[in-house]
DNA sequence: CTAGGGTTAG
């Protein structure tokens, strides 16, 4: 168990040590007599709905007591009725109950709960006397209305006039610290709590637990939890959430099981926290059990619980279960919509193949449209997810529309939305607009900086990437391992070997970040780009690195372009062993043996493909023009006579005159197998690009998505097409983004190209 | 008067 924090005896002198001996907060009611006329007039001033409620408690009767207003005020809280509070307040004034401290306190609380902090404060200031509950009500109001700094200043005011805090008061102050991430004040309060030995109290312990959780100190949060004498369901829930929020999901689930074992009944809030943990752990089994449990304990229809389960199912690919839950919800909240959209957005990266990923993305956009029509207003969660979807769909037009919507609604100023926008423009091939979006952000997080650095790197703009990295360090943001992936890949693309090694060293020694596979991949990539393929192999051996698929495909591409065939075969066989179910790899290997004329190996690979039932590869491309999606398969007969085929033929002719040579050995053609392997394949992206050229204006960018990675032949061809047509052509394949312009590609003609 | 929850970016 971790030790308690040091007691900071800061400005706690005003805190009263007599915390345990507080005067009873409730003030006895004083009964008064009122004239009939007065009472009737007061009753008439009530709004209709409350007059009705009033008569139920005998409001017409002239002997009404001050406490009779409490249920009415409670009703205002429950229904969030602003006009109701004002009306009842008026009635109370007329009835002459303004001296009733208890009632006035309740009124302050009611104003606060209804979000009317100005009224609450005005009433508070007008009171001739207040007790600690009045003070606490006002503070709690500020916390609930997202004004934690006001809550703290009220707390200081109270201490200044000699008020005594209670455990409730301290809980609220801790809560305010938590919203402000003010760990310093939090520790002072904690010091006071330790000094007067009241850590055992649940309202204090629970608040401490969530404070430390929010301030990223899981040990302290657990410590606070353990010191609570009578742990209630809220204590357990707080500590479970703390585990989840601080990256220890497994412990969170353990604590949940322990809670059940100790016979503490979870409630809907507990289950939501647990479900959220299941989600991050992709623990579908546990989540399903919690789903059953939620039904058993009667909170199966709680909206937050349902949203969590729905999201869990989505993230685990159980679309129909998620849809069933969604359809069963009677009042769909914004969070429900957001979870649906985020779930589908997530599916686009989890999907097995590019084609299904694409359809999940389309589905997410459809849900977003339905949300817009439903009358609810999208928020920052919605916009961030939708922008991510636009990124994976390379859907620039939709992305621009969402951009406009974020501007109009004011959510553009949110840092997460801003970062999502940077990524959207980047992944749609527009580095200039990505950079503009980044520059216009008012605040930036590590993720924002990292996104922009990686964006520059992906576009082959090494200098800008490195400059931005230095800017980021200059403003004091600490890079993480993903930042270094951007930095190293920028160096590697530009062939800056010395800088790459220097940054690699900086990462390990200055920032104490252990290299991961992506960093190695950058360095291997760099050696290969510089033509040092044996150095690349040496580097792998030297680092005891077990290469992953990405590294093998870099080595394959390098070996092929440098004519080191034996290395290429070796690497390809390794890749196949690593990904035995990957049809793309089989075709790659097949092509390599075919082009080398190694027929024995050709038939061996063919046999393996038959055994594994790999007989075709889903080469699909699609292009979106004016919000309509067009899908293409590799050159099938029906396209031969079309205008698309004509354009393509013409482009081929003109490309040949510019020196382009067809590579005839690429076998990525389905259906007409045997023949097709010998023919220059019109892979799907060629058709999609031709279609795009035909159907857009002369200056427009062409943006195509492809389900598998581009082959070398198509890559060469499209480069030439970008010269012939003076167009920018963007192709996002399964591995990376290719932005072709004036005969060049942003990938630097490299990176797993086969 | 009090404490815990669901959905966002690399």
Image (cartoon, rainbow, N blue to C red):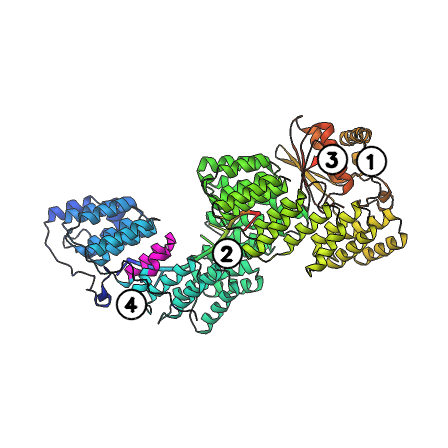
Q: Characterize the local packing of mark 2: few (<14), some (14-19) or many (20 or more) Cα atoms within 10 angstroms.
A: many
Identify the residue position indicated by label 2 in the image: A308
Q: Nearer the viewer, residue A88 or A612?
A: A612
Determine if the magenta segment contains residue A182: yes
Task: Estimate the x, y position of residue A657 in percent, counting from the top left.
Answer: 82, 29
Residue drawn at (63%, 39%) of the image: A459
Region in magenta: A168-187
- Tell me the tag on residue A661: 1
Instruction: Output the chain of dot 3.
Output: A
Q: Secondary structure at mark 1?
A: loop
**Left or right of residue A224: residue A320:** right
Mark before the other along the chain sequence, 4 or 3: 4
Within the image, what quadrant is residue A614 found in?
bottom right
Q: Nearer the viewer, residue A341 or A96?
A: A341
Identify the residue position indicated by label 4 in the image: A195
Q: Secondary structure at mark 4?
A: helix
Query: What is the spatial separation of the Cα atoms under label 4 and label 2, in whole angstroms?
Result: 41 Å
Q: Is residue A362 visible?
A: no
Mark before the other along the chain sequence, 4 or 2: 4
The answer to whether tags 4 and 2 share a subunit is yes
- Labels 1 and 3 touching (C-beta < 8 A): no
Identify the residue position indicated by label 3 in the image: A718
Q: Main secondary structure of the magenta part?
A: helix
**Left or right of residue A503: residue A738:** right
- Labels 4 and 3 touching (C-beta < 8 A): no
The answer to whether tags 2 and 1 share a subunit is yes
Q: Secondary structure at mark 2?
A: helix
The mark closer to the camera, 4 or 2, is 4
């Amino acid at each position: 168990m971790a030790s308690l924090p040091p007691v900071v005896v800061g400005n706690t002198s005003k805190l009263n040590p007599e915390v345990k001996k507080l005067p009873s907060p409730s003030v006895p009611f004083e009964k008064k007599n009122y004239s009939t006329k007065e009472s009737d007039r007061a009753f008439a001033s009530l709004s209709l709905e409350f007059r009705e409620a009033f008569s139920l408690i005998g409001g017409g009767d002239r002997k009404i007591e001050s406490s009779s207003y409490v249920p009415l005020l409670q009703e205002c809280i429950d229904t969030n009725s602003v006009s109701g509070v004002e009306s009842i307040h008026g009635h109370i004034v007329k009835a002459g109950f303004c001296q009733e401290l208890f009632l006035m306190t309740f009124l302050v609380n009611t104003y606060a709960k209804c979000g009317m902090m100005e009224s609450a404060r005005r009433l508070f200031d007008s009171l001739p006397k207040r007790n600690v509950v009045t003070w606490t009500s006002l503070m709690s109001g500020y916390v609930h209305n997202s004004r934690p700094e006001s809550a703290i200043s009220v707390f200081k005011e109270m201490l200044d006039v000699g008020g005594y805090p209670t455990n409730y008061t301290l809980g609220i102050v801790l809560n305010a610290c938590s919203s402000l991430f003010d760990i310093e004040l939090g520790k002072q309060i904690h010091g006071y709590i330790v000094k007067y030995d009241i850590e055992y109290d649940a309202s204090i312990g629970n608040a401490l637990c969530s404070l430390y959780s929010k301030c990223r100190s899981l040990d302290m949060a657990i410590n606070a939890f353990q010191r609570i004498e009578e742990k209630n369901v809220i204590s357990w829930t707080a500590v479970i959430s703390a585990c989840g929020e601080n990256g220890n999901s497994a412990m969170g689930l353990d604590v949940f099981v322990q809670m059940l074992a100790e016979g503490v009944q979870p409630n809907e809030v507990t289950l939501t926290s647990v479900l959220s943990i299941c989600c991050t752990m992709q623990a579908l089994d546990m989540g399903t059990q919690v789903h059953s449990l939620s039904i058993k304990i009667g909170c199966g229809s709680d909206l937050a619980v349902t949203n969590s389960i729905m999201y869990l199912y989505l993230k685990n690919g159980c679309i129909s279960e998620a849809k069933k839950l969604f359809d069963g919800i009677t009042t769909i909240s914004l969070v429900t919509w957001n979870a649906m959209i985020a779930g589908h957005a997530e599916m686009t990266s989890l999907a097995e193949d590019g084609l299904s990923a694409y359809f999940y993305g389309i589905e997410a956009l459809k849900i977003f449209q339905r949300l817009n029509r439903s009358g609810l207003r999208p928020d920052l969660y919605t916009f961030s997810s939708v922008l991510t979807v636009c990124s994976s769909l390379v859907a620039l037009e939709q992305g621009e529309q969402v951009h406009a919507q974020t501007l109009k609604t004011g959510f553009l100023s949110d840092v997460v939305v801003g970062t999502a926008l940077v990524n959207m423009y980047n992944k749609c091939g527009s580095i200039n607009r990505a950079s503009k979006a980044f520059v216009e952000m008012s605040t930036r997080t590590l993720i924002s900086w990292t996104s922009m650095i990686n964006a520059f790197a992906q576009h082959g703009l090494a200098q800008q990437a490195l400059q931005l990295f230095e800017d980021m360090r200059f403003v004091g943001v600490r890079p993480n391992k993903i930042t270094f992936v951007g930095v190293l890949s920028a160096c590697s693309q530009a062939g800056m070997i010395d800088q790459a090694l220097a940054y690699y060293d900086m990462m390990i020694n200055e920032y104490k970040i252990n290299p991961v596979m992506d960093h190695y991949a950058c360095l291997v990539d760099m050696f290969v780009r510089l033509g040092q393929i044996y150095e690349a192999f040496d580097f792998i051996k030297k680092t005891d690195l077990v290469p992953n698929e990405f590294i093998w495909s870099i080595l394959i591409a390098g070996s092929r372009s440098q004519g080191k065939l034996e290395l290429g075969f070796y690497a390809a066989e390794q890749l196949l062993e690593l990904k035995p179910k990957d049809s793309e790899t089989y075709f790659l290997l097949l092509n390599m043996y075919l082009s080398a004329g190694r027929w024995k190996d050709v038939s061996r690979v063919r046999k393996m493909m038959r055994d594994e039932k790999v007989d075709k590869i889903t080469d699909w491309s699609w292009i979106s023009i004016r919000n309509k999606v067009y899908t293409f398969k590799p050159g099938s007969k029906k396209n031969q006579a079309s205008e698309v085929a004509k354009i393509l033929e013409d482009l081929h002719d003109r490309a040949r005159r510019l020196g382009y040579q067809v590579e005839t050995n690429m076998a990525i053609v389905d259906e007409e197998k045997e023949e097709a392997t010998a023919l220059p394949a019109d892979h799907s992206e060629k058709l999609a690009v031709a279609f795009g050229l035909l159907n857009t204006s002369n200056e427009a960018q062409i943006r195509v998505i492809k389900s598998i990675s581009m082959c070398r032949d198509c890559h060469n061809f499209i480069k030439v097409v970008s010269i012939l047509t003076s167009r920018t052509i963007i192709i996002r394949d399964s591995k990376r983004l290719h932005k072709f312009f004036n005969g060049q590609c942003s990938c630097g003609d490299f990176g797993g190209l086969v």
